[in-house]
Amino acid sequence: MSISDYAVVYDISSDAERNRVDKALKGFGFRVQKSVFECRLNRRGKEQLIEKLKALNIETGFIKVYRLEYSSKDIVIGDKKEPDIDDGAAFIV
């Protein structure tokens, strides 16, 4: 079964709607910025996530789901931090 990484980005003005989206996304991935989550999902997980987000009936903004590709080198503009354990496409525990 194929697994892919996704970034879920949202811009929602209603606090109540934003809180519902946050709660739904916490079940699928982790927050990397205030309105950005990263999720590692198989096909079924992606379908479940999209169904759950659609069911929220967001009216005050939008949610976008992007598939992340790691085949190319990252481009960093601005301050470059020192290498971190979390850098890279995957890590093994």
Image (tube, helix red, strand yellow):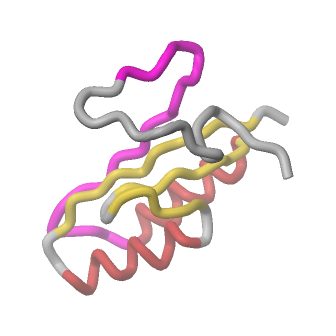
Q: Across the whole image, how many numbered discs are drawn on residues?
A: 0
- Above or below for 83 versus 39: above
Residue at figure coordinates x 71%, y 38% from the top left: 90
Residue 11: image quadrant is bottom left
- Above or below for 6 versus 35: above
Residue at figure coordinates x 32%, y 70% from the top left: 57
Asked if residue 61 lies in the magenta stretch, the reply is yes
The residue sitting at the front extreme is 82
Residue at figure coordinates x 34%, y 47% from the top left: 64
Asked if residue 18 lies in the magenta stretch, the reply is no
Residue 81: image quadrant is top left
Residue 8: horizontal and vertical position, in percent? Answer: 42, 51
> 83 or 68: which is nearer to us?
83
Q: Quadrant of the N terminus?
A: top right
Residue 65: horizontal and vertical position, in percent? Answer: 42, 44
Residue 20: horizontal and vertical position, in percent? Answer: 39, 80
The residue sitting at the top extreme is 72
- Above or below for 82 versus 58: above
Residue 87: horizontal and vertical position, in percent? Answer: 58, 38
The magenta stretch spans which residues?
Answer: 56-75
- Above or below for 93 versus 60: above
> 79 or 87: which is nearer to us?
79
User: What secondary structure predominates along the stretch shown in magenta?
Assistant: loop
Q: Is residue 37 shown left or right of residue 87?
A: left
